[in-house]
Structures are given as structure tokens and as C-alpha cells.
Amino acid sequence: MTATLTGTRPLTDRTREQLRRAGNPFRNYFARNPDDDVCARYHVAELFAAERDLLHSIIDLYRHDPNTHSEVVPILGNKGAGKTHLLHSIKHGAGGQWQLLVNPGVFQKETDFLEYMLFQIIDTLLGGGRQKGSRPLDYIGDSLVRRLLGLAIRDLSSDEKVELFPPPGIGRWARRLGIGHTQANERADWLADQLSGASDFGRAPTAVLQSLTDAGLSPTRAFDLMVAYVQKTEPRNTAGLMRRAIFAGFAKAVLLKDESDLANFLTYGFAELDFNVKPGRQDLVLALFKVMMDVLRGLKIPVVVAFDQLEDLLLARRTDDCHRIAEAFFAGIVQVMHQLDGVCFLIFAERGLWNRFVPSLDGYIQDRLNNPVHVPGHGTVKALRLEAPPAPLVRCVIEARMQPVLETMPDSDAMSDIFPFTDEHITRIAKSEPTLRDMLQQFRHLYDHVVYETTESTAMPVESFDNIARMTIDENGDDDAIVPLLPSLERPFGYAAVSLNPIPGALSTADTKSRVDALLGHDPEPMAVTFKSVDIISDNGVQNVIAPKILPPQPSRSTFSGAALADMWDQEFRAARRKLEPEGSLTGATRELQAGLGMFLATCHEHGVKVGPWRMQHVVPEWSYGEHPTYGLITLAHWACKDGQPWKVGIGLFMAKGAGKPKDLEVKLSVMDARPIVVDHLILLRPEDDLTISGKSKTLWTEAEKKGHHARLEAVTLDAFAMLYSFPRWLAAVRESLQEGAPLPNLADSIQDKCEKLLEQVCMPVQQ
């Protein structure tokens, strides 16, 4: 069998078999998040190049003038327009300079927004994720240590430089005799130039550790030198004390490869400084936030906070009060804009969602959100809108998808770059589909049809509509919705057909399937309208037919298989585990892990997950208390066993190490002293490599037991923490993969299969 496509070589049985073995390259047709490798694998630099350049120019405003007022830039487009792919190219692409891009995966609705934003930045900074090939801690730390160490060396006196670089042999006597000063000064100046990048002539500066090795200076000696310089130059006010600790933490992380001090200070130590007057929780958060921004401004590193997939971020459950949550979210952004300069907010949202939420907000919030940004060379930007790409760009996208397939074929040189498609296919689909995702879906169906020869015996050919000029609707009734339905002749495989009474020239019942549904073997969606009378105008005159009532559409059913859910789970889990592997990342992700735990338990409640005889009756995802910004947060779950009284269980993360360990335990245990009683039983999740309780921590635990409090420690593996971290992202990926309006599938089986051990750890004890 040989099929011929216009403008291409014949598709022989041998060629078709080769394409079948390669698989359909359009199966994975969209990116679930900006870190998804689908973006990198199929990236097309020309796609949204102008929009990307504009966003880079906006970000550069904050690089050139770090005190630029914080502003919001909405990036609006229909679902599937390519917003996530654009964000990926900003975060990981080759264009533009490095910026700290924070991409929250979950919105902590019950948390103070400034607090929420601070810990999103800390999580991004300490996490193992990469941006433009570099981990944020490594890039920022290297830049900071390079600058401060260079200043410290230049600040040394001549004798101190000789102490730093003593002459070989009779070093001590040479220093006493004044010998070796010239060589020591030259080496010190050379190292200072290396650290500043002045000797690299436009190339990327040499890494700090490499420069130290070349100069013969040990990392330990460099660390001591930098810490002494910071202690001498920084003031002793609150901001100065915070900068000292942050600078020393970065120096230890970069020079000595120990991130613990920085992670501990950003999550615990900043609240334990020696204050004359102890500030409140919000004042502490604001003080640390301002110092962090000051450090980054000094390095000319912009802070970009990008909210992607806004609907899933704000409306994690469809039962949520969407207006209240949206108002809290946008009011929080405006609060940050008023209190801090230098933050660039990018909001990637569907147009309909943006137009639904923003006009209903208070006037002062609308004014700040709609405030235009003036960009040199581009003019005034109020919002950036993503439109469907034209046919030439669509062709580039198809080439990128087909290239890995065609490279495996022995005679690919004789084939078109878009084989087995034609330019006519691309032109027709580009003109008829509203978004890039819709286009890729159409190419997926077309590929199945051409390569796998999916049957279309029941499909209606386009030519069947040639003699239909128009359809008129009789509007005598007033109860039913009447909408004219015209076939879209531009859409090669995506129009709808109407089933009418069988008369000569009318459509048959079998024709109710669209060509796409016929190719896939799916039943079509019932139409949402009722046709009472239709006039069909042909060469034989006008024929009036009475159409039967078409039933209203039924709710869409999810078609997710267990394998598809497991595949998405594994993908998000692996990404989360990579982010949590570095030493300080687990501590820095404390708040994000707590948010993941809250969403995990809330989803278990909604989907009826059971643990032995126990079932949840109520969940509060996040409950904050006390004055400590990091430790004063737990999740509440009411577990009931059959007809018994439910236990109010508090589940918290006990993550602190070193000096912060007793304070973390003290704050967590204090929740059981609250009145009225909030927690009957407290479960603390602790990394499995540090379960020992001694000293002051042991005393606190013993005192709680004497009061009759019920508490237990659970040893949690890195894999279990990765499950909590990835859960909100997995849930968003599942929602994003659903058809419009389709409900979530029941996730109970998937959760119990993947998280059986974790469920037992966050539940009341199960009798074996």
C-alpha cells in the first residue's frame, strides 16, 4: 500500500514502519512547568523571540537601576498559548543575563504574603534547581565572595599582604628585614584583579576557588580574611548584623563547601539576633527581606518572581472561594510592591482569568496592577499578550519535533524537514487553530492518521459541505438556546457535524463524529444546543427539516490511566529530589515542604484516602501560631476511627539543626498548650539522619510528657520529603493535562500506592 501526500515523497510501507517505530513525537505536546525538559528538547528560539526580548529588557531595568520600583507585568494568553514555554526560555534559555527567578509552585493562602514570598526566595536560593546552568547559591555566592574578597585584599596593608603571601624559605626573617614586600604586593594585586574579573578581558571571570589555587592561597585563609573584613566594615545595627551572618554564610558555602550556617541563619538565626527590642513576626520578616534584597542589589542581580498557571496556583480546589483567594493574592503583591523596591513580578495568566479577577478588585489594587512599565527602545508596556504563531513559526516547531525522528531514518536526506506533513497541512492548521497547543494536538492526530492509518470510515469529508451555503434557525420557541452552527472549512480535522432526520442530501447519524474523533475512535461530545428547524440550501432548492432534540452535554469524564498518573508522578518526584539533595536545601525548603504536606493531606481528605481503620474528617492545610516565622506553622488533620471521637492531630516539620534545634522543638511543642485545645496528638517529621534528642531538646521533650502531652517523632527519608515537595506540582500537572472542564480523576489509588509509608507516618498509629 502506498499513500501520496501533496508536496512530499510517497509514504511507503517501509517508511511508515520506520515512523511507527520512532513513535509519535507529538504525544508529549506541552510543558507542565518551566523546568520540564520538554521545553528544552523542543525549544525553537524564533518562537516568541520578540516577547522574550521585551521581558529581558524589563528585567534589565532592575539590573541597571536596582532601586527601580517593584512592578507587575502580566503575560496573557489562552490556555496552551505557550506561556510556560516562554517562562522556561527566560529561566533557562541562552539569551539574557542571569537573574534570580523565583517560580512558586504553591500559593500558601493562609500565610502572610510577605512571609510567603521571603521563604519562596530562600527555597529557590538554597535548592538544588538550576537556572541558566547554575545553581542560585553557587552563582550568587561566587559573585558575592569574589567582590568581598577582592575588597578585603585591596584593604590590606603592605605588611598584611606579606603575612598573606610570605616569601619562601626564610619567610619570618625576610619579613623582619623587609624583604619580599614587592612580590607579596604583586601577588595580592594580581589576585584582586582576578577576583574582580579585570584580567579576563570580557570573558567569564575565573571561579573563586581556581583563582585562590593559582595564587597559592588556601580557602580557609581566604575565609578568615573575608570574615574579618566584614566584621570590620559592617555596622552593628540590625541590618548590619544580618549582612554579617549572610556574608559569612555565603563565604563558608563557597570556600569551605559547608552550607549549614547560611541555611540555619535564613531559617532560624535571623530571629535570634541580640535585639534591644524584640521585633514582631512581620517586622522580622521584612527586615530579613530588605537585607536579602540589598545583598542582591549590590551584585546587580535582579529578583524576578514569576507566577505561572495562575488558575491552578490560586484555585487548588474548585470549592475554594475564588474571589477571596484572588483578592488576597493580588493584595499581597501590592503589599510587597509598597514595602520593597527591586522586585519584578511576572504573572503568566489566561486572559479570561485575568479579566475575571482584576476588574473585581479594589481600585487601589487595580491601579498598581495596571501601572505601565516604561522600557527604553520598546515604549510603554501595560501587558504582554501571546498570540497564535503564524505558519512559518509553526513550521519551525514541527521541524523541531520531527528532527529526532527523521535523523533515525536511513534516507532522511531525501525527505522534507516536516515529513510526513506538507506545507499545506501547516498553513491550514496554523490558520484554523487558536493556540499552539491546539495546533500540536491536531498534528498529533494527523500523525496517527497518516502513519498508523487510523480508520476514518465514519468521518465526514470536507467536500460533503460544498453544497451547504447557510443554515437558518427557526426561533419560534423561547426555552432553548439557539446557536447557528457552521462548518469550519479551514480546519482539516476538527469540525463538528449535526445529526438530522434522514432525508435526501441531509447528514447521516454516523456523521456526528468529527474526523478527529473518528481517527481516535472516541465518541464526540454532545452539542450544547437544540436545533428546532434547519433550512439546507442546495442546487435543488431549499429543504426544511425538523431536527430532533440533541441532549445537553454531560460532564466530561477523565480518561487518565494509572500509568499516566504514575509517569507524571515519577517525573515531578525526580525533579524534587534533585532540588533537595544539596546540604542546605532541605532546611531552606521547610516552608515549601509544610505547604506540600498541607496540600497532600487536603487531597487525601477530598479523595477518601484511608489508613487502616482511620479516615480524615477535617484538614487545615496551614495553621500558623506564635512569633517565629519559620517554626510556628503546622498542618491540622482530624483522624477518626469508625464511630469514635476524632483525634486532632498536628503534623509539623522538625528540621532545625545545631543551635536552632531546641528552639524549633520548643515552638512546635508549645502548640499543645494552646487553649482551647487545638492539638491532641503532635507528629514531628524529622530527617532520618538526625533523630537523636539530647541536652535542652531532651529536657523540653520530657517536660511535655510530664504535662500529659502526646507527641512522637517520625524518621523521614529524603524520598518522602521529595514526595511532599513534588505533590503540589504533580497535582498541577494532572490538572493541566485534563481537557477543559474535566474533573480530577480519583487519586486515592495513586496516593496510597506511592505514599503508603508516608501516610502511616502522618496518621494515628495503625494496629498491626
Image: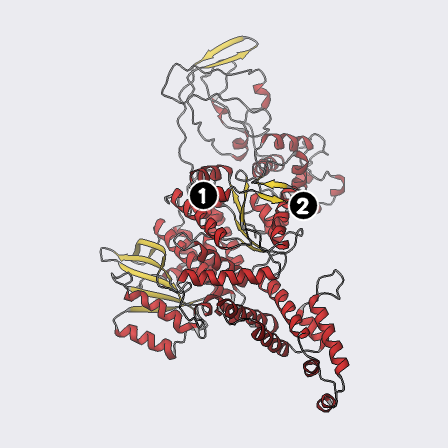
- The structure residue drawn at horizontal position 60% and vertical position 63%, both measured from the top left corner, is 140
Location of residue 664 (image quadrant): bottom left
Give the class, few, some or many, for how many residues have Cα within 10 Å of label 2's Cα (few <14, many ≥20).
Answer: some
In this picture, residue 699 sits left or right of residue 261: left
Q: Residue 636 in the image: state x and y as whole percent.
A: 33, 58
Mark identifier at residue 364 = 1
Which secondary structure lies at badge 2?
A: loop
- The structure residue drawn at horizontal position 60% and vertical position 41%, both measured from the top left corner, is 380
Q: Residue 532 in the image: state x and y as whole percent.
A: 41, 17
Q: The C terminus appears in which quarter of the rendering?
A: bottom left
Q: Residue 672 in the image: state x and y as whole percent.
A: 29, 66
Q: The N terminus appears in which quarter of the rendering?
A: top right
Which secondary structure lies at badge 1?
A: helix
In this picture, residue 342 sits left or right of residue 183: left
For the residues marked 2 and 1, what is the alpha-carbon distance in whole angstroms?
Answer: 38 Å
Comparing 364 with 619, the one in front is: 364
Q: Which residue is mark 2?
A: 45
Comparing 270 with 579, the one in front is: 270
In this picture, residue 306 sits left or right of residue 179: left
Name the kind of residue labelled 1 in the image: Tyr
Q: Residue 767: in sight, yes or no? A: no
